[in-house]
């Protein structure tokens, strides 16, 4: 597992039914592109997060495939519908097989 | 200016060099786009790409893509060592077919976004981003 991987997610705590809400996510990760070389001229192997998935109560919101051209500490902003109260599940998949997860509750008034 | 043989050849070489350089860089991206669209020519309407005209640091360039009614948006960087940047698949709970993120650009180049619409058609938009410091290391 890559070191110091911390997911951070911003979701409003409340929404009205059917409202479009904006979600921002950031995960601290080096996203080593596989293009860089160390001081001895050896290529540093690629180590990135290659997939990011957001689900709400089991239904998909967005599914992103990431290439090495995504910056260090991948940031995403997108919009989601909230039909009822429930939980957003955020999942990041690392090249090395690690899976990072985060979830956020939202209440529909 | 008197047009000597030497000057003519030099000028021709310069023009050829300038013309060939961006074409070679975009060939990989065009191949990737053709692969995605299945060879169909993408339209120009229905997709917007927001990117800065000048990015000081190629390591983190903020971009935003939006294509109402799209099921999938792919982003390519035509001048990067590998053109793929990201693929966004929108699920049933996506309120808008938009996303923003931060990308790496190796140098001044075109960023291309291609959307696959729900009816199976494609839309493409490209924008040039000038990069002062490249973002791919050395």
Image (cartoon, coloured by chain):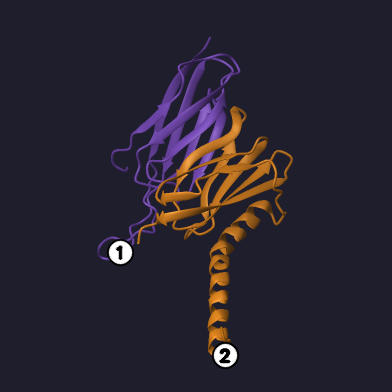
Q: Quadrant of residue A2?
A: top left
Q: Position of residue B85 (x, y in %)?
A: 50, 50
Q: Is residue B120 left or right of residue B13?
A: right
Q: Residues within 10 Å of mark 1 (few under 14, many from 20)?
A: few
Q: Which residue is mark 2?
A: B5
Q: Secondary structure at mark 1?
A: loop
Q: Quadrant of residue A61?
A: top right
Q: Nearer the viewer, mark 1 or mark 2?
A: 2
Q: Is the C-beta separation of discs 1 and 2 under 8 Å?
A: no
Instruction: Identify the colour of chain A in the image.
Output: purple
- The residue at 61%/18% (across/down) is A18
Instruction: Identify the colour of chain B in the image.
Output: orange
Relative to B137, say whether A15 is above or below. Answer: above
Q: Which residue is mark 1?
A: A42
Q: Nearer the viewer, residue A83 or B133?
A: B133
Report in which chain the residue with disc 1 lies. A
Q: Is residue B108 visible?
A: yes
Relative to A17, say whether A58 is above or below. Answer: below
Q: Position of residue B27 (x, y in %)?
A: 58, 64
Relative to B81, say whether A10 is above or below. Answer: above
């Amino acid at each position: 597992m890559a070191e110091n991987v911390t997911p951070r997610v911003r979701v409003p705590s409340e929404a009205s039914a059917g409202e479009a809400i904006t979600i921002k996510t950031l995960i601290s990760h080096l996203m080593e592109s596989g293009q860089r070389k160390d001081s001895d001229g050896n290529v540093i192997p690629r180590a990135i997060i290659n997939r990011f998935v957001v689900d709400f109560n089991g239904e998909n919101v967005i599914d992103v495939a990431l290439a090495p051209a995504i910056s260090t500490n991948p940031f995403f902003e997108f919009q989601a519908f909230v039909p009822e109260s429930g939980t957003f599940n955020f999942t990041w998949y690392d090249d090395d097989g690690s899976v990072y997860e985060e979830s956020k509750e939202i209440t529909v008034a | 200016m008197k047009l000597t043989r030497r000057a003519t050849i030099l000028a021709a070489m310069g023009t050829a060099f300038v013309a060939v350089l961006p074409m070679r860089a975009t060939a990989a991206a065009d191949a990737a786009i053709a692969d995605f669209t299945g060879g169909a020519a993408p339209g120009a309407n229905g997709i917007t790409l927001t990117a800065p005209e000048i990015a000081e640091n190629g390591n983190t360039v903020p971009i935003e893509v939006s294509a109402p009614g799209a099921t999938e948006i792919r982003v390519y960087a035509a001048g990067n060592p590998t053109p793929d940047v990201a693929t966004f698949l929108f699920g049933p709970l996506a309120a808008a077919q938009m996303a923003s993120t931060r990308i790496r650009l190796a140098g001044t180049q075109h960023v291309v976004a291609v959307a696959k619409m729900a009816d199976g058609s494609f839309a493409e938009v490209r924008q040039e981003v000038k990069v002062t410091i490249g973002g791919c290391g050395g």
